[in-house]
Image (cartoon, rainbow, N blue to C red):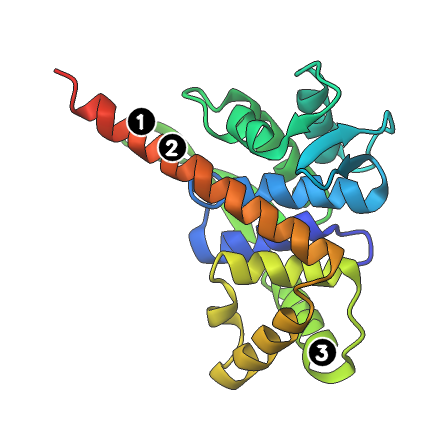
């Protein structure tokens, strides 16, 4: 599991819960995970005023490369994080998001986290994603051991736990007691740099979601 990145681990947990990576309320968190992942690897920076700056350093992971190129195509030195999320996740076609998720799925297949099957449906073929249950269990055990027993938390693990907490997945992974303990630890870590970035990203996602919801309501009211 050493070659499996945090975004892949989070995506596996997302698939366990939702069976898809195209869940409109959750897919922005995949993009946030990739952005923070690239920040930790030195591929980009997130400034104090929440703008993304590329460092002209090609990311290692293929899905991060695709996202990096999408941000680069925006042709701006500093891009507000909420603008990046809007351009990737909140468009009518979602073409860029679909492209990035497609590459992510390829990487997860390569790392034997998932398998892809095609099943015939009433209106055509449908892709079905099956997760590797053993890998999922190993990831959950890793989080549990590090948080509840060892207490040696890396930035990667803080990122994963923060994402799981943000999208309410922790409640199905931990018992009530364990969840409270992990929540207390995350609360103690709220002033760390990575926790602050996640909080900024959460605010940006909420803002974009509210904007899109308002646009849909307005559109529905037009006759």
Q: Position of residue 85 (x, y in %)?
A: 55, 32
Taking the image as shown, residue 64 lies to the left or right of residue 217, namely right
Pick the quarter of the image with the N terminus.
bottom right
Pick the quarter of the image with the C terminus.
top left
In the figure, residue 160 lies in which quadrant? bottom right
* Separation of marks 2 and 1 at Cα, in angstroms: 6 Å
Q: Which residue lies under the disc numbered 3? A: 145
- Residue occupying the point 28% across, 28% down: 216
* Separation of marks 3 and 2 at Cα, in angstroms: 39 Å
Q: Which residue lies under the disc numbered 2? A: 211
Whether label 2 touches label 1, CB < 8 Å: yes
* Residue 27 visible: no
124 and 12: which is toward the camera: 12
**Disc 3: CA contacts within 10 A as few (<14), some (14-19) or many (>=20):** few
Rendered image: mark on residue 80: none
Q: Which residue lies under the disc numbered 1? A: 215
- Residue occupying the point 47% across, 62% down: 168
Q: Residue furthest front?
A: 49
Taking the image as shown, residue 5 lies to the left or right of residue 95, namely right
In the figure, residue 58 lies in which quadrant? top right
């Amino acid at each position: 599991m050493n070659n499996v990145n945090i975004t892949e681990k989070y995506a596996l947990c997302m698939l366990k819960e939702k069976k898809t990576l195209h869940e409109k309320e959750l897919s922005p968190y995949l993009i946030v995970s990739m952005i923070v992942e690239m920040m930790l690897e030195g591929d980009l920076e997130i400034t104090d005023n929440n703008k993304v700056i590329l460092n002209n350093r090609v990311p290692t992971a293929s899905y991060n490369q695709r996202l990096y190129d999408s941000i680069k195509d925006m042709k701006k030195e500093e891009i507000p994080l909420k603008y990046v999320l809007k351009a990737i996740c909140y468009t009518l076609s979602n073409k860029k998001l679909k492209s990035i998720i497609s590459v992510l799925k390829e990487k997860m297949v390569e790392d034997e986290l998932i398998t892809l099957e095609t099943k015939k449906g009433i209106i055509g073929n449908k892709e079905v994603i099956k997760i590797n249950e053993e890998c999922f269990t190993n990831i959950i055990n890793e989080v549990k051991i590090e948080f509840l027993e060892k207490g040696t938390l890396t930035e990667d693990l803080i990122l994963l736990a923060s994402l799981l907490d943000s999208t309410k997945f922790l409640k199905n992974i931990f018992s009530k007691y364990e969840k409270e303990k992990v929540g207390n630890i995350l609360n103690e870590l709220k002033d760390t740099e990575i926790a602050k970035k996640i909080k900024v990203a959460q605010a940006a996602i909420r803002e974009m979601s509210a904007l899109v919801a308002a646009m849909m309501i307005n559109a529905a009211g037009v006759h």
